[in-house]
Image: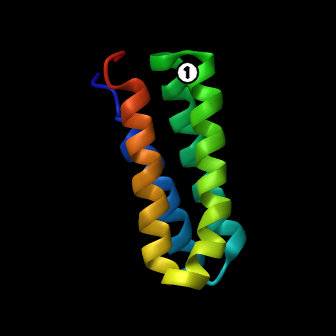
Amino acid sequence: MPRILSPAIAAAGLVGGYAVARWTKKRPLGGVVLAVAGGVAAREWQQVGGAKAAVGLTGAYVAAFAGSHPLAKKIGAWPAVFSVAGAVAAASWAVTRDKG
C-alpha cells in the first residue's frame, strides 16, 4: 500500500480543522479534525524520519495552529490558515523527502 504523504496530511489537518470549525460553528469538532490529522502525520513522521523528526514537526504543527490566530488578525483567517499549512507542509517535505 502506498504511503500517504505526511506534508499533505499536515496541511489538510490545518485547513480541514479550520474549515470544519468555521462551517459547523463547533470549534471542538474542528479541533478533532486537527488532532486526528496531526496524529496521523506524527506517526508518518516517526516512521519515515524517526523520533526527532516527529517531535520537531509535531511542534511545528502545533506552533502553526497557534500562530495562525495572531496572523489572521493581520492578513485574514483563510490567508493565515493557508500560509501556516503551506509552511508546515514545506517543513515536513524538507525533513522527510529523502527518507521515505
| Image: 18 above or below 7 | below
Indicate the secondary structure of the residue bearing disc 1: helix
Above or below, 69 relative to 17 = below
51 versus 65 height, above or below: above
Q: Nearer the viewer, residue 9 or 71?
A: 71
Q: What's the residue type where badge 1 is placed?
A: Gln
Query: Can you say which quadrant of the picture contains the N terminus?
Result: top left
The residue drawn where x is 65% and y is 67% is: 29
How crowded pointer 1 is (Cα within 10 Å; few <14, some 14-19, many 20+) is rated as some
Name the residue tied to disc 1. Answer: 46
Horizontal side of residue 5 vs 15, given as left or right: left
The residue drawn where x is 63% and y is 84% is: 25
Judge from the rendering whether residue 8 lies leftward or rightward of residue 46; answer left or right: left
Which image quadrant is residue 9 in? top left
How does the figure colour the protein chain or chains? Answer: rainbow
As displayed, is residue 7 above or below residue 28? above
In the displayed structure, does residue 59 sit left or right of residue 82? right
Q: Position of residue 18 (x, y in %)?
A: 54, 70
Q: Quadrant of residue 65?
A: bottom right
Give how far across and how far down residue 82 sits, in percent.
42, 66
Q: The C terminus is located in which quarter?
A: top left
**Percent from the top left, x then y, of residue 46?**
55, 21
Residue 100 versus residue 69: which sits nearer the camera? Answer: 69
Farthest left residue? 2
